[in-house]
Amino acid sequence: MKIRICIIAAVFALVAVGSGQALAASPTLDSIKSRGALKCGITTALAGFAFADKRGVWRGFDVDFCRALAAALGVKVKFIPTNAKERFPALQSGEVDVLFRNTTWTLSRDTRLGFDFAGVNYYDGQGFMVRKDSGIKSAKDLDGATVCVNAGTTTELNLGDYFRSNGMKYKAVVYETGTEVRQAYEAGRCDVHTTDASGLAAQRSAMKVPGDHIILPEIISKEPLGPAVRHGDNEWGDIVRWVLNAIIIAEEKGLTQGNVSRMAISTKDPEVQRLLGKTGSVGDDLGLDPDWALKAIRKIGNYGEVFERNIGKKTPLALARGLNQLWSKGGILYAPPVR
């Protein structure tokens, strides 16, 4: 009799999971909805990615993804600036719900620190910047250099690996924030500024005379940057992952901030219909409203729009899409199907 009861209970459990509702139970999502705001951890200040404008309004590439996530949830967003040292304790303690702040996905962060990375929103790599009048043309010319670097980052670790593997010596000058690193380099306290290549472009754009500095050609690491959440709430990780995917798929499918509401009515594309909540149960599976993706795309646009608006060729950073171009156009940007 007990065996029969256990079997029946197991069947009901499977039915509940199949309905999508059991999968949607997320303590993080419940907390966000209860307070009416998403707490999004961002960097303290990085041109193009996260910065406060003259009116104190946060803007940037990572900031836009925070806004898209909040829109999909139907809540406001609270931006919480964190430096490299503060960001992980802030996520671990629950001070923030998600990190969208140029954070590299690594094995130790995925395991030892207890985080889950919900995809990649920017493929990057570490580089070096020097003064144009230094005469330095290659990273191989940096033997004996003093290097300004951000504490508590993969940048600091990669720096040591690179110099050791090339039989070169260096002296690290370490600072807590990217702004401090830039200011120290610009003041002449070091010969070299190192961080992710996108970060170098951002920091150079904030200097008094950007043209006085060059970024060397070598890229010495892989830096997949993306949103991080805490281990143990898989349902919340799914939401963050699929909001990011929705923004990428929007570009693949030609959905823009301006046309997505119209396309939600007129599209005949089955995947777009599922994404925008016209057919299927994607919203239920995530524990969100059917139009979650529509709201996110209507808020910030597709990936290409976010890129060009904040860091693209017509901005002070003037970054090319490169690896961050869609897979169908020569890049590696790719989202799984909505099915």
Image: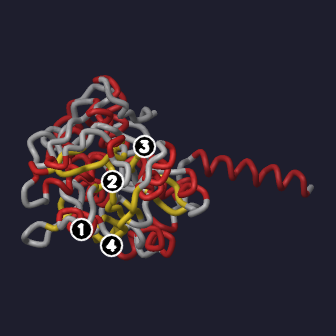
Which of disc 3 and disc 4 is earlier in sequence?
4
Q: Amino acid at mark 2?
A: Thr
Which of disc 2 and disc 3 is earlier in sequence?
2
Q: Are marks 4 and 2 in contact (CB under 8 Å)?
A: no
Q: Amino acid at mark 1?
A: Ala
Task: Out of 171 and 113, give the one closest to the viewer.
Answer: 171
Label at residue 221: 3
Task: Find disc 2 in the rendering and name its residue.
Answer: 195
Image coordinates for residue 11, horizontal then vertical, percent: 73, 47
User: Residue at coordinates 26% horizontally, 70% vertically from top-left?
Assistant: 180
Task: Find disc 1 in the rendering and name its residue.
Answer: 184
The residues tagged by marks 4 and 3 sit, at their Cα atoms, a distance apart of 39 Å
Which of disc 2 and disc 4 is earlier in sequence?
4
Label at residue 36: 4
Q: How is the image coloured?
A: secondary structure
Is any atom of residue 332 visible in this view?
Answer: yes
Foreground mark, 4 or 1, reads 1
Q: Secondary structure at mark 1?
A: helix
Q: Amino acid at mark 3?
A: Ser
